[in-house]
Image (spheres, rainbow, N blue to C red):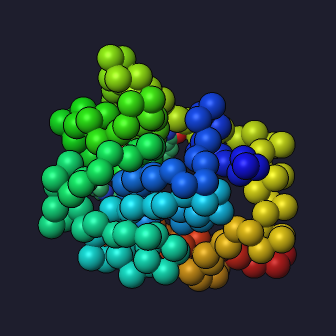
Amino acid sequence: MEEVPNTFVTLSASVHLGQTIWMLGVASTGFALQLAKNAGAYVIATAGPRSSEHVEAAGADEVVDHTATEVSAAVTELVDVVLNLAPIDPAQLAALPALIRSGGVLVNTTVWMPAPSDEQRGVRGIDLFVNSDAEQLSRLVALVDSGGLRVDVAQRVPLAQLPAVHAQAAAGELHGKVVIVASAA
Ligand SMILES: NC(=O)c1ccc[n+]([C@@H]2O[C@H](COP(=O)([O-])OP(=O)(O)OC[C@H]3O[C@@H](n4cnc5c(N)ncnc54)[C@H](OP(=O)(O)O)[C@@H]3O)[C@@H](O)[C@H]2O)c1
């Protein structure tokens, strides 16, 4: 199976056909979800009430409301990969390896806390940082051009409205990308 070029999964463990991946905080970027679906994964996503419709539309197979259910209580079957994109607390992060099959991977972007592993079961914790890799980014652009990756542009606003965009983001009212348009000189 062809591996999907994936900014998030630079992690030596790519997501493959038939694998199950649990994503926390996926509303903050639709790309991880789309790339996992492109790779043939079954995606369970956590999303709060403000994001669930958006996450379903982006292709999640199941959506679990993290404001109503503790993630660890919602897992009925162990998954292959957990991708954490959410600002969860240390206890929530520490509970994640137990949700992963032996040999699976926990990828954590909330890197002020190191990703925990479970060495006995071969579950690896991987800390993932933003990585501006030109070759990888150009593969993502090619995917956008071919329609394999959709950029969800929510709005285009003039530069003068940037403070309002930040306020919207801080209030959790922003979904998708915002294009800031500089006025012509
Ligand atoms: N490693 C890196 O290079 C890098 C780069 C940037 C940011 N980060 C880190 O990534 C994390 C997310 O940053 P962000 O700016 O995207 O944050 P954010 O917008 O505050 O949170 C992203 C999403 O996480 C969800 N969420 C919040 N609490 C949750 C919980 N307890 N369980 C599950 N989902 C939860 C929310 O989803 P709903 O809207 O669905 O409620 C929210 O939309 C932060 O810890 C940040 O420090 C890392």
Asked if one can make out residue 169 in the rendered structure from this viewpoint, the answer is no
20 horizontally vs 73: left or right: right
Q: Which of 34 and 162 is in front in this view?
A: 34
Residue drawn at the location 40% of the way across and 53% of the way down:
22
Q: Quadrant of residue 164?
A: bottom left
Residue at the spot x=84%, y=75% of the render?
185
Q: Height in image: 155 above or below 15?
A: below
Q: Where is residue 171 in the image (x, y as percent from the top left)?
A: 32, 70
- Could you say which is closer to the camera, residue 132 or residue 183? 132
The answer to whether residue 123 of the structure is visible from this angle is yes
Query: In the image, 19: left or right of 121?
Result: right
Viewer-nearest residue: 176 or 96? 96
Placement of 179 over or under 9, stated as above or below:
below
In the image as oriented, which residue stretches furthest toward the top?
120
Give residue 174's position: percent from left, percent from top.
44, 74
Q: Residue at 70% of width from left, 68% of height from top?
A: 149
Residue 52 place in picture, x, y as percent: 35, 76
Name the residue located 83 percent from the left edge and 70 percent from the top edge.
145
Could you tell me how many numbered marks the image carries? 0
Seen in the image, is 100 located left or right of residue 18?
left
Q: Where is residue 27 in the image (x, y as percent from the top left)?
A: 43, 65
Q: In which quarter of the image is residue 129?
A: top right
Relative to residue 170, is residue 183 drawn left or right? right
Viewer-closest of 123 and 160: 123
